[in-house]
Image (spheres, grey):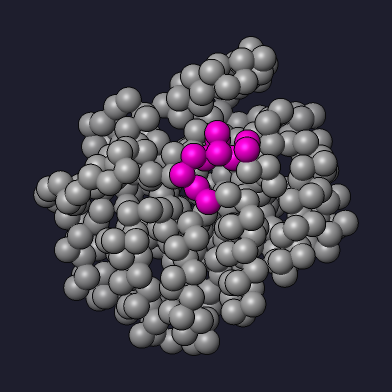
Amino acid sequence: MGQEDLREKGGVTYRELRARSLLNKCDSPRMPFAWTVNPYRGCAMGCRYCYATYTHEFMGISPPEEFHSLVYVKVGTEEETARRLAAVVRRGERIALGTATDPYQPGEAESRVTRRFLEMVAKHRRARLGITTKGALVLRDLDLLQRINERSELSVHVSLTSPRADLLRRLEPLAPPPEVRIEMMRRLTEAGVETWLGLAPILPAITDAEADLDLLLEEVRTAGVRHLFSNLLFLRSPTREKYLRWLEAEFPRYLEAYRRAYEGRVYLHGPYRQRIRDLVDRLKKKHGFAGPAAEEDQARPARQLLLFE
Ligand code: SF4
């Protein structure tokens, strides 16, 4: 792999990263997919809780905040990606696009790595693809997504945990506001694409209020979405230190409770976890969402957290 700066935009440096293929094998048999695709390393959306922050440590980069200001764009991968993709589709294996970083983050407007990958997928029949994103740029590719959906298995998972734009501006500074993400879901659903609400990560004391979740599920269901998965905040180093620094600045009253709750663990268990599970199940039933119970939902993204490329 070699690297070279491409450009600087909006305080984010984009650097080229030569990679052999966009498709990477996921070796865990417990994962619901066999291959992952992450066209970028680093993500400009800036989410304070972003679990993928540690992947920059493998590039020798710290502090963790740089995960959001130095983004690597994978290049030079098309021939090997096309070859692997043909074999993956032939074997009927599932592909997850966006397991570690957002494939529709701001840099994609210019780099178009995600779009080029989707163009390859669109040439196949019976591909099996799931996309996870917060980026409204996904609508740019609606034509391709429809084409893929006609010939293959496709689902898009849009992450959104609160209907409160003011809160999300502080929490996910470069991600689109809730009304834009709900509109994304509406348009994807209208285009016939299986669309999921990714209610993840739910942040204790910050995005777990029943009234907020109730309103969010109502609005998303009204947009036509029928599927939902959920997950609680997962805190491992260096995200843990980064998130706690943010909490200290923005919500200092919760700092001690977080420190105690996450002491010696990366994931919450016990009565709080059960309460959130029951709440999500109840709201899913109330608003008519289909899909697995929250118990199973929560296992799914938690396993994804272990992934990186
Ligand atoms: S959009 Fe996803 S990958 Fe990007 S910063 Fe937010 S949580 Fe991390």
Q: Is residue 63 left or right of residue 143?
A: left
Can you say whether 104 is above or below 120 in the image? above
In which quadrant of the rendered view does residue 190 lie? bottom right
Note whether residue 256 is visible.
yes
Q: Is residue 215 left or right of residue 43?
A: right
The residue lying at 63 percent from left, 43 percent from top is 165
- Along the viewing direction, whichever of 13 and 196 lies nearer the viewer: 13
Residue 82: x and y in percent read 26, 75
- Along the viewing direction, whichever of 102 and 44 lies nearer the viewer: 44
In the rendered image, residue 71 lying in the magenta stretch gets the answer no
Residue 40: x and y in percent read 32, 52
Q: Residue furthest top?
A: 256
The magenta segment is 166-176
The residue lying at 71 percent from left, 28 percent from top is 205
The residue lying at 82 percent from left, 41 percent from top is 211
Can you say whether 175 is above or below 221 in the image? above
Note whether residue 33 is visible.
no
Count of marks placed on residues = 0
The residue lying at 27 percent from left, 61 percent from top is 111
In which quadrant of the rendered view does residue 64 lie? top left
Residue 48: x and y in percent read 50, 33
In which quadrant of the rendered view does residue 288 lie? bottom right
Can you say whether 91 is above or below 107 in the image? below
Residue 274: x and y in percent read 79, 36
